[in-house]
Image (cartoon, rainbow, N blue to C red):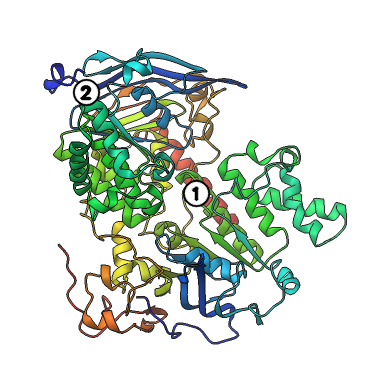
Amino acid sequence: MSSAAPDRNEVEPLIETVELRTHFRTPRGIARAVDGVTLQIRRGQSLGVVGESGSGKTVLSRSIMGLLPRNGVIREGSVRYGGEEIGNRTPKQMRSIWGREMAMVFQDPMTSLNPVMKVGKQVTESLRLHLGMSSSEAMAVAEKIFRDVRIPEPTRRLNQYPHELSGGMRQRVMIAIALACGPNMLFADEPTTALDVTVQAQILDLLSEQIRDRNMSMLLVTHNLGVVAGYTDEIAVMYGGKVVERAPTKVLFSNVKMPYTEALLQSIPRMNQPSHSRLAMIPGRPPDLVNPPTGCRFAPRCAYARDVCVREEPPLVQAETPDHTFACHFPVGSAEYHERRVELNRASTTTAEVL
Amino acid sequence: MAGTGKAHLRPEGEALLRVEDLVVEFRIGRTGLKVNAVSGISFDVLRGETLGIVGESGCGKSTTGRAIMQLPRATSGSVVFDGRELTTLDKEEMREVRTKVQMIFQDPISSLNPRRKVRDIVMEPLNVWKRGSKDEQGAAVDKILEEVGIDPKRAAESLPHQFSGGQCQRISIARSLVLEPQLIICDEPVSALDVSVQAQVINLLEELKKAHGLTLIFIAHDLAVVKNISDRVAVMYLGKICEIGPSDGLYTKPAHPYTKLLLDSIPVPDPNVETRKVVIEGEPPSPVNPPTGCRFNPRCPSASDRCRSEEPTMREIEPGHFVACHHPLFGGDAPVTVRTD
């Protein structure tokens, strides 16, 4: 719809959410899956959304796209696409945007493809529907896209069913479907989690190449910080339905502020650690979204939490570098952080001595 | 790659588990075709050692784990556990061996009975084998639940779905430990979990291994996780072992081109590391019709004519570090230059 006019301007974000809230009615009460998220994605930019299961990252991407169940959902706040409010649109009104303007690549390529329809037909479906192509025109375009996403023998593959393809090939088909109508915005929800490392690298390279060539924006949802490090411009870390830290990718990795982000980074097993080294872990589990803890939602698991963290929720504040925001009373690098750190180190050495 | 040979096996008797020339084939319907899931691999695991097995989907790593348990029985080859040949045991004898060899599966939620209380699930093996009185059984279960960090009281009144994925994996671990096994085969035990929870489960496995004197086989596709927990790592490709060695050595100095490509494919959590362009093309060929010679030759950057005709055998290139490759990255004769572009 609105792809042409306003977003020529580089300053205008392609996607903007303001205080977006998506709550679900459940038998236990209201689950606050997304609880006040404000973010912008510029044209050509890729944003990584990182967090544990249940942090609200998938619901966030689905809320922006308007792919939510019809019943039991409470939505608040605004979603703007190219300057236009789309947060209040019905699925029927969104259909002109889905596929053509925004597309999504899902995690599990087996269950998201129609098992009884040839993959060629699944790609041409949207071309015919949205762009009004004839079936032979659409087939020709589909073949070209298959070539773009490097599916070998595209003509033969178009006539196959999903079960005849490997996991990596199926994910390429998913990407081909998403790219078919030339969307401006691509949502990729854990696109490589179900795949092998070798295939993961291929798919991520393919995605970033297509984003660049087509000047698209991408929102990449993942729990793997290794994946976002190499393939995004900016990162938003989510915890308990909120964005708790946001920064350009390089800044985030070199200057972490939020102890949660730091803990996430430390819990990745590294190749350069000797084997059997004890992995840093985050104790406990993600918060209950029906009864979230008061104050900072990470406080119950945070090694640096103090009384104030449990009482008062820290606001999202600006770090010293531009575009870097975080929500923490005692960020990494603060005097209180260091003080606690020294205590923790002393405690661990004394335990070691006792042992 | 995938080579044959047993140069890497340690003297008989030293190992708790010794697998030789293991072959597992599956027939495809009535087509007369066979899937060569595991094509003649040999390895051993010493008492108290952790062996990691890595490889892509379809390389036969899970089938190997299951074939040790005789689930299903191997097509040919031998599996010797604690001095006993398992492949010739009858059903009843094998049942008894399974009290000493336990398995933990990938999906913790679907491997627990959804309609039984968690404490009963963990108690079940003791019931089946009639170990001790009711009270002794209860005490043993509570002790093991405490050890894996699950509240026994809660376990007595809750069903598996009331626990998170990480907690369910802890429950599976408790169930596998309750009979005091010697060997635990962990098949992708953490791949369904979040990174933060993964670390909890791995640390727990390390603690339990020490406390109970366990021997572990750790099967996974995540190389970093395998490295951390293992003493020795075997890399599998299309039903064969291509490299096996001490975990630190194998990761810092991979000798097989496939191991190197696997390592290079891992995304590095550091934006300053330049992302390498696709390091490995394509996907493993079908195990129905594997390539001749070294099975990795169609994807290998240093493949030569010899690799296409002759299957490499295992040889030692460093103490304890073995590779099955005609042109290893070090320790071989005149390696063919590896394409780096």
To the question of a shared chain for discs 1 and 2, the answer is: no
Q: Chain of mark 2?
A: A
State the mark number for residue B305. Answer: none
Nearest the camera: B223 or B3? B3
Residue B272, position as x, y percentages in the image: 22, 47
Circles 1 and 2, Cβ within 8 Å, touching? The answer is no
The residue shown at (54%, 37%) is A285
Quick check: can you spot residue A114?
Answer: yes
The relative height of residue A209 versus residue B207 in the rendered view (above or below) is above
Kind of residue at badge 2:
Leu
Q: How many marks?
A: 2
In the rendered structure, which amino acid carries the disc numbered 1? Gln
Q: Nearer the viewer, mark 1 or mark 2?
A: 2
Q: Identify the image quadrant of the C terminus of chain A.
A: bottom right
Left or right: where does residue A3 sit relative to residue B92? left
Residue A101 in view = no
Does B90 sit above or below residue B176?
A: below
Callout 1: SS? helix
Label 2: few (<14), some (14–19) or many (≥20) C-alpha neighbours in 10 Å? many
The quarter holding residue A115 reads: top left
Element type where label 2 sits in the image:
loop
Q: Nearer the viewer, residue A299 or B200?
A: B200
- Residue at the disc numbered 2: A14
What x and y, as percent, mark residue A105? 33, 37
Residue under mark 1: which chain is it in? Answer: B
Q: Which residue is mark 1?
A: B198
Q: Quadrant of the N terminus of chain A?
A: top left
Residue B192, x across and y down, in percent? 50, 47
Residue B46, placed above or below residue A151? below
